[in-house]
Amino acid sequence: MNDSFGPLTHFLAEDHRRLENVLQRAVARVGRVDQGVYDQFRAGLLRHIGMEEKILIPAVQRWTGGEPLPLAVKLRLDHGAIAALLMPTPTPSLIVTLRKILDAHNLVEEGPEGLYETCDKLAGGEIELLLGKLRTAPSLSVLPHVDTPAVLGAVRRALDRAGYEYVGDRPSS
């Protein structure tokens, strides 16, 4: 990790790398997903999204006198698409789609003028308080996968809203 990054960027980008490693372990055997490890990934990713949605994005809005972060709409659409993809049973196509979205999404958050850099710039004396809230964000448990037509339709709609396409066989509605 680049030492020139602020503490919030460093903490959250490191969490991205940790989650990428957990996902890699979950799919390390070709054609097979280690469900226990994948559930760790799901819980960790949902916790990470929660940190951004419940701690960071509201903090930026507070620091800017109520002005929403211009990136917030894009981030929330991405978060919705990512969370939707975590509901069905993982397939190779789902994993490819999820990785594609995460790669693009992480660049927006970690990049110049992204969510993390913005937080580092605006936090001022609140950085340690914010880091404390991030570190103590609650762990989450995950529900079993659901592959009903209603869930697959919700996945399709969430991807469409966020501007992404399902790689491979598209979930049906």
Image (cartoon, rainbow, N blue to C red):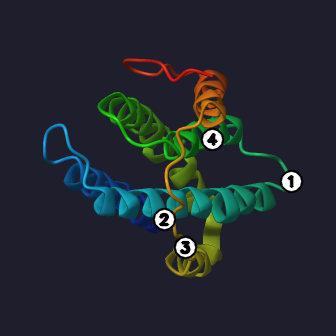
Check if mark 2's residue and mark 3's residue have beta carbons within 8 Å.
yes
**What amino acid type should be assigned to the residue bearing mark 2?**
Leu
Q: Which of marks 4 and 1 is nearer the N terminus?
A: 1
- Would residue 172 be found to the left or right of residue 70 on screen? left
Relative vertical location of residue 136 with respect to residue 117 in this rendering, above or below: below
Relative vertical location of residue 130 with respect to residue 81 in this rendering, above or below: below
Question: Which mark, residue 80?
Answer: 4
- Circle 1 — which element? loop
| Rendered location of residue 1, percent (x, y) | 27, 58
Q: Residue at x 62, y 37 (%)?
A: 151
Q: Nearer the viewer, residue 157 or 33?
A: 33
Check if mark 3's residue and mark 4's residue have beta carbons within 8 Å.
no
Q: Name the residue under label 2.
A: 8
Spatial CA span between label 4 and label 1:
23 Å
**What amino acid type should be assigned to the residue bearing mark 3?**
Leu
Q: Nearer the viewer, mark 2 or mark 4?
A: 4
Question: Which mark, residue 134?
Answer: 3
- Quadrant in the picture for the C terminus: top right
Which residue of the protein is positioned furthest toward the right in this rendering? 66
Dot 3, how many residues are within 10 Å of its Cα: few (below 14), some (14-19), or many (20+)? many
